[in-house]
Image (cartoon, rainbow, N blue to C red):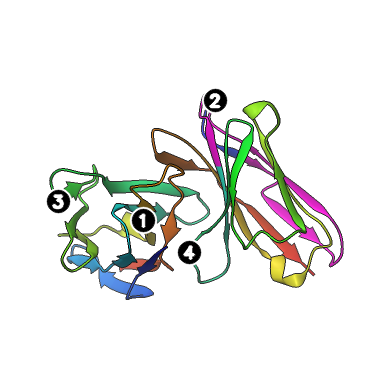
Amino acid sequence: AQSVTQLDSQVPVFEEAPVELRCNYSSSVSVYLFWYVQYPNQGLQLLLKYLSGSTLVESINGFEAEFNKSQTSFHLRKPSVHISDTAEYFCAVSDREGSNYKLTFGKGTLLTVNP
Amino acid sequence: DTGVSQDPRHKITKRGQNVTFRCDPISEHNRLYWYRQTLGQGPEFLTYFQNEAQLEKSRLLSDRFSAERPKGSFSTLEIQRTEQGDSAMYLCASSVAGRQFFGPGTRLTVL
């Protein structure tokens, strides 16, 4: 079984400031790691994923996340946020050794970018 | 738009009534998932299909819940004798090669 902890339920920041959204996971097996974003009144969208290889993964809109196996973390960062980044962000894992790829999500972090 | 679609987007019902939701996955996606999201929580896995076969059900899926995917295309999720605790957003996702694409969800309110 897996579990995901997102340490901050809300993160308010000013536009152009850096931001880090924290995610820690617990699992008895190896996992794949994901960040999903949910904009107001929209469905969940995949932001980035770690499957294998380089532990630093990047999205097309400037976010990055680094897989740290020893700390069981997958924190999401962006050096300079925009108002349009306001959304809820969910960290998720799935069992690498299983075949169903079901996702276990954290409770989410609401990022609010203020002008 | 060829994404995952869900119908209806909103459903208000009275306690004790039955409700049915529909999910149309992206065509050719052989896997289909249902999740439930309550206020302040992340989505929780309910069940998943590979083609028409329902391969796993969460213990969250009580016997009042039933899901089908006839012919491996669209899927339906039925809740019988709804309870106020069933109020939530019901999300559907389809996938191929492990990446899941989510629909907009059906928000259920049980009065």
Residue A19, quarter of the rendered image: bottom left
Q: Amino acid at mark 2?
A: Ser
Residue receiving disc 4: B42
Q: Residues within 10 Å of mark 1 (few under 14, many from 20)?
A: many
Q: Which residues are magenta?
A: B6-32
Q: Amino acid at mark 3?
A: Leu
Q: Residue at 70% across / 65% down in the picture?
A: B86
> Could you tell me if the residues under marks 2 and 3 are in contact, i.e. CB atoms within 8 Å?
no
Q: Label 3, secondary structure: give it.
A: strand
The numbered disc on residue B111 is none
x and y percentages locating residue A42 in the rendered image: 50, 50
Residue receiving disc 2: B27
Quadrant occupied by the C terminus of chain B: bottom right
Q: Nearer the viewer, residue B39 or A74?
A: A74
Residue receiving disc 3: A56
Q: Amino acid at mark 4?
A: Gly
Q: Residue at 18% across / 61% down in the picture?
A: A69
Q: Amino acid at mark 1?
A: Val
Tell which subunit mark 4 falls on: B
Q: Residues within 10 Å of mark 2 (few under 14, many from 20)?
A: few
Q: Residue at 20% across / 60% down in the picture?
A: A77
Q: Nearer the viewer, residue A90 or B49?
A: B49
- Do the dots labelled 2 and 3 sit on one chain? no
Residue receiving disc 1: A93
> Could you tell me if the residues under marks 4 and 1 are in contact, i.e. CB atoms within 8 Å?
no
Please say whether residue B81 is one of the residues in the magenta stretch: no
Sequence-first disc among 4 and 2:
2
> Could you tell me if the residues under marks 1 and 3 are in contact, i.e. CB atoms within 8 Å?
no
For marks 4 and 2, give the CA distance: 26 Å
Q: Label 1, secondary structure: give it.
A: strand
